[in-house]
Amino acid sequence: MEISINTPSILFPAFSLLMLVYTNRFYAVGALVRELIVQQEKNETDHYLYDQIKNLKTRLRLIKNMQEWTVAGYLFTVASIYLIYIGQPIYGEYAFALAVITFSISLILLLVEVHYSTGALHIVLTNFELQKESDKK
């Protein structure tokens, strides 16, 4: 299979968009962590807050890894274009394949992070249900 110099360039918009999405997720989760830590300091006995903060810490780590894999894919894409440009198409194809692989890893990590995100919502809903049950008693 021979690819043209235009083939790797189709990934540029995807990488840019993913970095924007991942950065927004990172800032949103970071803001939640700060807010929950303030709440935790006010009420040290609330186990729910500790679970939430622990979940958010895991999500922050995942988002950081997602960003790192996306940047690696971006660099492999640039390398692919450069290698094709200087007349090394076979190495350009390898670099392009690595770009697609790193892009895929980033998306797999996104799925894992979404799983943790729904886990965080489960913690909130469980706490809400427990509070409602204790209010009835």
Image (tube, grey):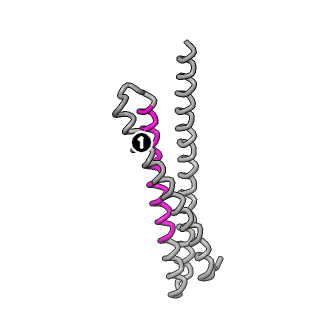
**117 w.r.t. 7: above or below:** above
Q: In the visual, does 66 lie left or right of 40?
A: right
Callout 1 environment at 10 Å: few (<14), some (14 to 19), or many (20+)?
few
Reading the image, the residue beneath label 1 is 35
Residue 98: give x, y in percent of width and height.
53, 67
Indicate the quadrant containing the N terminus: top left, top right, bottom left or bottom right: bottom right
Residue 134: give x, y in percent of width and height.
53, 17
**Total marks placed:** 1
Specify whether residue 69 is painted magenta. Answer: yes
Specify whether residue 40 is painted magenta. Answer: no
Residue segment shown in magenta: 49-75
Quarter assignment of residue 39: top left
Q: Which kind of residue does numbered mark 1 sit on?
A: Glu
**113 w.r.t. 77: above or below:** above
Indicate the quadrant containing the C terminus: top left, top right, bottom left or bottom right: top right
Residue closest to the eye, 4 or 10: 10
**103 w.r.t. 77: above or below:** above
Q: In the visual, does 129 lie left or right of 46?
A: right
Residue at 53% over, 80% down: 81
Residue closest to the eye, 74 or 85: 74
**72 w.r.t. 60: above or below:** below
Secondary structure type for disc 1 = helix
Residue 93: give x, y in percent of width and height.
57, 75
Quarter assignment of residue 90: bottom right
